[in-house]
Image: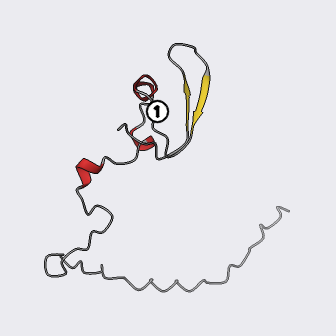
């Protein structure tokens, strides 16, 4: 059994140079599979994940609890002083 695609893939057939669109769930032959180099295009291998890959429930005693990082209060905005404009004295 070949590998299954997890996403739609556009590939050019290595012998005919014809552009093909392979849909998720398809199992392309070895020639086409060799052309698909993006690892994210493939579904994960069942051998690597084990039998209960979809039903992983961590043991609460072995899972480290992470403490939330303390948040800081925003600093108060400095009081804005009213700006005054001064006019240049005209030279007499």
* Count of marks, rendered view: 1
At which x and y percent is residue 26?
49, 41
Q: Which of 81 and 27 is in front in this view?
A: 27
Q: Which residue lies furthest to the top in this view?
A: 15
Decide: is 19 above or below 54: above
At which x and y percent is residue 32?
46, 26
**Quadrant location, the C terminus:** bottom right
Residue drawn at point x = 28 percent, y = 61 percent: 53
Q: Nearer the viewer, residue 30 or 11?
A: 30
Q: What element carries label 1?
A: loop
Residue drawn at point x = 52 percent, y = 83 percent: 77
Q: Residue furthest front?
A: 1
Q: Which of 89 and 7 is in front in this view?
A: 7
Q: In which quarter of the image is residue 87?
A: bottom right
Decide: is 1 above or below 92: above
Instruction: Answer left or right for 80 relative to 3.
Output: right
The structure's colour scheme is: secondary structure
Q: Which residue lies furthest to the right in this view?
A: 92
Q: In which quarter of the image is residue 38?
A: top left
Decide: is 88 above or below 44: below
Residue drawn at point x = 40 percent, y = 26 percent: 30
Instruction: Answer left or right for 20 relative to 47.
Output: right
At which x and y percent is residue 13?
54, 20
At which x and y percent is residue 67?
25, 81
**Quadrant location, the N terminus:** top left
For label 1, the crowd category at 10 Å Cα-Cα, with few meaning under 14, some 14 to 19 and many 20 or more, is some
Residue matched to label 1: 28
Instruction: Answer left or right for 88 relative to 79.
Output: right
């Amino acid at each position: 059994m070949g590998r299954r695609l997890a996403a739609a893939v556009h590939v050019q057939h290595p012998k005919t140079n014809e552009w093909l669109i392979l849909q998720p769930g398809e199992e392309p032959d070895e020639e086409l599979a060799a052309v698909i180099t993006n690892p994210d295009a493939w579904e994960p291998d069942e051998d690597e994940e084990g039998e209960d890959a979809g039903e992983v429930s961590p043991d609460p005693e072995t899972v480290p609890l992470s403490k939330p990082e303390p948040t800081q209060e925003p600093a108060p905005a400095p009081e804005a002083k009213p700006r005054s404009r001064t006019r240049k004295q005209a030279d007499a």
